[in-house]
Image (cartoon, rainbow, N blue to C red):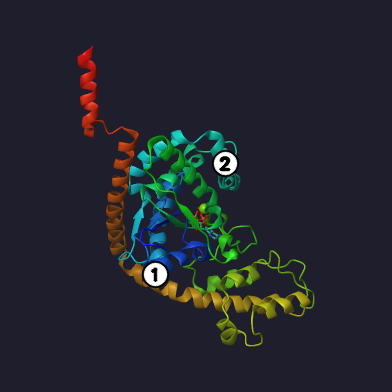
Amino acid sequence: MAKDTVILTGDRPTGRLHIGHYVGSLKRRVELQNEGDFKQMFVFIADAQALTDNIDNPEKVRQNVIEVALDYLAVGLDPSKITIFIQSQIPELCELSFYFMDLVTVSRLQRNPTVKTEIGMRGFESSIPVGFFTYPISQAADITAFRATTVPAGEDQRPMIEQATEIVRRFNYIYGDTLVEPQIMLPQNAVCCRLPGTDGKAKMSKSLGNCIYLSDDAKTVKQSVMSMYTDPTHIHVDDPGHLEGNTVFTYLDAFCRPEHFGLYWPDYANLDEVKEHYQRGGLGDMKVKKFLNNILQEELEPIRQRRAEFAQDIPAVYAMLRRGCEQAREVAAQTLSDVRRAMKINYFDDADLIKEQAARFAQK
Ligand code: ATP
Ligand code: MG
């Protein structure tokens, strides 16, 4: 990281945040925040984007804004070090999206693999809301309005960052160097790029109901772990087990650390030994699940506790968000002013334009 780094990420308030968000993005954000090696860091709640596929359920979005804010505070995001804001409170983002719409073709949007998958997931094939279809453009506005250089996110966001980069290049090519190109920062651990759901589906996702939420109580987490998808061919303990697509092992790859063996499973020295035994046969799913449960409980307990503390003063959380929105708006307004100048639509601030036109008409 360098001192001119600007970090930005957002989450849709379509539900509480889950352990996929945690390993895919949140954990990294907290580390970056605490290292402090950046110029600015923004984290935002993408309520306007959430409305693009929830327009008939605005209450869901409204309720989840505060849930996501609490999740942020619970994992350790700290509004005294970074800016936390709500997307819809920054009208400059709409204006920027409006100009960006002219830089992207319909067929380019249709090719976006994340949008394609999400359209399928939501059953939108024949009735895609225009706002949803174009959300990669508004996401490019979110990123560029804050001059973000670095976006810590999961794999599903890669096509969005590519789209944003193309928009920046096209804009800068036409209007001169104005906007900053962003880069995605994926998790170092490959399994964390796209954590599968507890049902074994490709991605843990609020919209798929296959999540372990950061705010789930201990009993709920345990139930989710115990009913988690494993290897359907591993019926008897002695059967050889498979690791491929086995969610319990994927989660162990994401969360297990060497010290967990001494604490919770001294029979094994490391994860490779467990995997080897499982594959050979003779190791039951229940034992592995109990181990995973212990690890997850250890990771989630402090988050749960902090969340409960912050939840005791909800007006203070809204006040924090309000301050964040004010700070964010100032930055976005500055970028917008640069954009208008570059596009030469700053008519009333452009003394040369007025003189030029006066001269042109004087000659007639
Ligand atoms: P929705 O279903 O409403 O889209 P979501 O669960 O996909 O919700 P988002 O708010 O879209 O969550 O994503 C927020 C951030 O978390 C993004 O950076 C995204 O890449 C990351 N993320 C989401 N799900 C996962 C996952 N299963 N594994 C790793 N990262 C994830
Ligand atoms: Mg998503």
Kindly identify which numbered label has been placed on residue 124: 2
Residue 298 shown left or right of residue 224 in the figure: left
Q: Does the residue labelled 1 lie within 8 Å of ligand 1?
A: no
Q: Can residue 274 be seen in this view?
A: yes
In the drawing, does residue 165 fall left or right of residue 85?
right
> Tag on residue 65?
none
Height in image: 254 above or below 183? below
To which quarter of the image does residue 320 belong?
bottom left
Assess disc 2: are there few (<14), some (14-19) or many (≥20) residues with their C-alpha within 10 Å of its C-alpha: some
Q: Residue at x 57, y 55 (%)?
A: 208
| Local SS, label 2 | loop
Quarter holding the C terminus? top left
Q: Position of residue 217 (x, y in %)?
A: 49, 72
Which is in the foreground here, disc 1 or disc 2?
A: 1
Name the image quarter holding the N terminus.
bottom left
Q: In which quarter of the image is residue 273?
A: bottom right
**Residue sitting at x 20%, y 15%:** 362
The residue furthest right is: 239
Is 262 or 364 nearer to us in this picture? 364
* Residue 76 x, y percent position in the rendering: 39, 69
Relative placement, left or right, of 112 versus 74 is right
In the figure, 164 relative to 266: above or below? above
Residue occupied by mark 1: 35
Q: Is residue 50 above or below residue 282?
A: above
The residues tagged by marks 1 and 2 sit, at their Cα atoms, a distance apart of 42 Å
The earlier-in-sequence mark between 1 and 2 is 1
In the image, residue 84 lies at what x, y percent? Answer: 35, 58
Type of amino acid at the residue the image marks with label 1 = Glu
Whole-percent x, y for residue 311 in the image = 35, 67
